Image: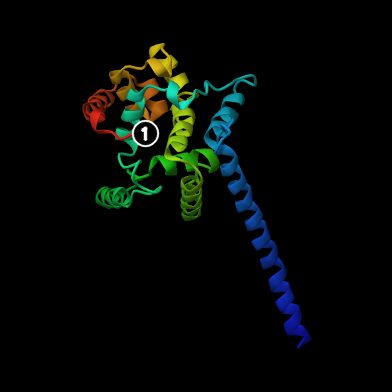
Amino acid sequence: MRLLLLLWKLFCYPVGIAVVALALYEFWFVAQVLYWVDHNPATTQVMDSRLEALRQKKQAAVLDQTWVPYERISVHLKRAVIVAEDAKFIDHEGFDWEGIQRALEKNQRVGRFVAGGSTISQQLAKNLLLSGERSLLRKGQEAVFTAMLEATMQKRRIFEIYLNVAEWGENVFGAEAAARHYFGVSAAELEPDQAARLAAMLPRPRYYDRNRGSAYLASYSESILAQMHTAQIP
């Protein structure tokens, strides 16, 4: 009997510690998300990763990012990003199940991972809080954090943060830095064709920063531009 009791304790202690650690871990993320409801994130996991790599080459290096409020971002960019990244952003609760199904079917046809079907909310959760690894555990965490964002923030706030932290080139983050980097104007001054081009870059921003003459980028930009009038923005 004593042996069974000892074994039970040996089992329960580590499990209990693991449960408490997990609870504290999740609580930290909840606290972070609640803080961001009315405070702007100073950085993201993606930004930290890029800065760390940059400072291995130059210790004093900094990222190119300037936060601007939602109303100072061109409506054209907002429409273009919705078209390119998440046409149902206004309507869904964080997950576009039809989009996920289409992405799965496309991946199965091709035989490798080529489409993810992530919404803007999912992308923001990943950029803010998660590492870049691909695993079932990370996808599960992404789903939890996406639900947290949707439960605590208005769509407008989610979109405002996304537009300010999205990666848009080599060490370029956010709409303001992107507008100045590529076109020499503020985010508020972006014209429709410029906005469409920036939105087209989002899936592979660093690649397109180096390959601005890409025929695919030009074609995709035209497609986005033609659909921008249909976009619903918060």
Foreground of the two, 38 or 120: 38
| Quadrant of the drawing holding the N terminus | bottom right
Foreground of the two, 160 or 26: 160
Residue at x 76% of width, y 84% of height:
3
Residue at x 49% of width, y 38% of height:
127
Foreground of the two, 180 or 2: 180
* Amino acid under disc 1: Pro
Residue at x 62% of width, y 51% of height:
27
Residue 25: percent from left, percent from top: 63, 52
Foreground of the two, 38 or 25: 38
Q: Residue furthest top?
A: 184
Is there any visible trace of residue 35 in the rendered image? yes
Residue 192: percent from left, percent from top: 29, 20
Asked if 129 appears above or below 4 in the picture, the reply is above
Viewed as shown, does residue 226 lie left or right of 20? left
Viewed as shown, does residue 66 lie left or right of 206? right
Of helix, strand and loop, which one carries label 1?
Answer: loop
Residue 18: percent from left, percent from top: 66, 61
Asked if 137 appears above or below 79 in the picture, the reply is below
Viewed as shown, does residue 150 lie left or right of 78? right
Is there any visible trace of residue 213 in the rendered image? no
Residue at x 48% of width, y 49% of height:
151
Residue 41: percent from left, percent from top: 57, 33
| Quadrant of the drawing holding the C terminus | top left
For the image shown, how many numbered marks are present on the structure? 1
For label 1, the crowd category at 10 Å Cα-Cα, with few meaning under 14, some 14 to 19 and many 20 or more, is few
Q: Residue furthest bottom?
A: 1
Viewed as shown, does residue 78 lie left or right of 216? right
Q: Residue furthest right?
A: 2
* Applied colour scheme: rainbow
Residue on which the image places disc 1? 203
